[in-house]
Image (cartoon, rainbow, N blue to C red):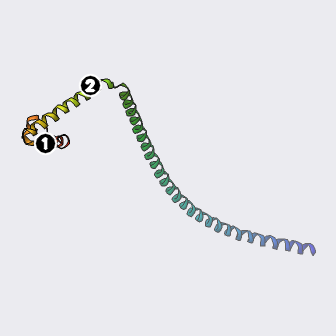
Amino acid sequence: MIALSLVIIGIVLIILNVKAIKKDEGSFKKELNNSMENLDDYKEEIGLLRKEFAETLLDVQKEVEDLKKEINLLKKNNINRDNLDEKVKVSYKTSDYKKEEPIIKENINENNIKIEEVNSLLKKGHTIDEVAEKLGIGKGEVILIKELYSK
């Protein structure tokens, strides 16, 4: 009798466990489906984040390229300016100052002659227009000479 009751209790326990396993399988399928749906939502969000990240990265790359172009342009301008500075230094060093001095003295002599001619014509009673025409210089220059040197 005890053996029979143990067998009956064992069979009842086996039946209850089989039913519990079947319920758990159904709930596992529900959980799996919920997880898959959530995974799809996460995949969509990840896709949007990747898209935004790619756009931001593209903008940054464009800015970097623009900055590289500006740097190259500035380097070229700096090189050109350095070359110009070197050329100016070379021409400054190679110019012969002794050759320029006689030109300056000749210009001073020519200016003195002009001043004397302007003063003499004005003293003779010629007008400023007449003096400018005779000497081939501008009226402003004649007036300037008159104001500076006639006094």
Residue at position x 85%, y 71% in the image: 10
Q: Which mark is residue 102?
A: 2
**Residue 82 vs residue 113, the one in the foreground:** 113
Q: CA distance from mark 1 to mark 2?
A: 28 Å
Indicate the quadrant containing the N terminus: top left, top right, bottom left or bottom right: bottom right
Image coords of residue 129 (percent x, y): 8, 42
The amino acid at mark 2 is Pro
Image coords of residue 26 (percent x, y): 67, 69
Q: How many other residues sit within 10 Å of disc 1, few (<14), some (14-19) or many (≥20)? A: some
Q: Quadrant of residue 100?
A: top left
Left/right of residue 92 with respect to residue 134 in the rendered view: right
Q: How many other residues sit within 10 Å of disc 2, few (<14), some (14-19) or many (≥20)? A: few
**Residue 131 vs residue 59, the one in the foreground:** 131
Q: Which mark is residue 28?
A: none
Residue at position x 42%, y 38% in the image: 78
Q: Quadrant of residue 89?
A: top left
Residue at position x 43%, y 39% in the image: 75
Report the residue marked by disc 1.
139
Left/right of residue 27 with respect to residue 135 in the rendered view: right
Left/right of residue 117 with respect to residue 11 in the rendered view: left
For residue 102, above or below residue 21 = above
**Residue 14 vs residue 66, the one in the foreground:** 66
Q: Secondary structure at mark 1?
A: helix
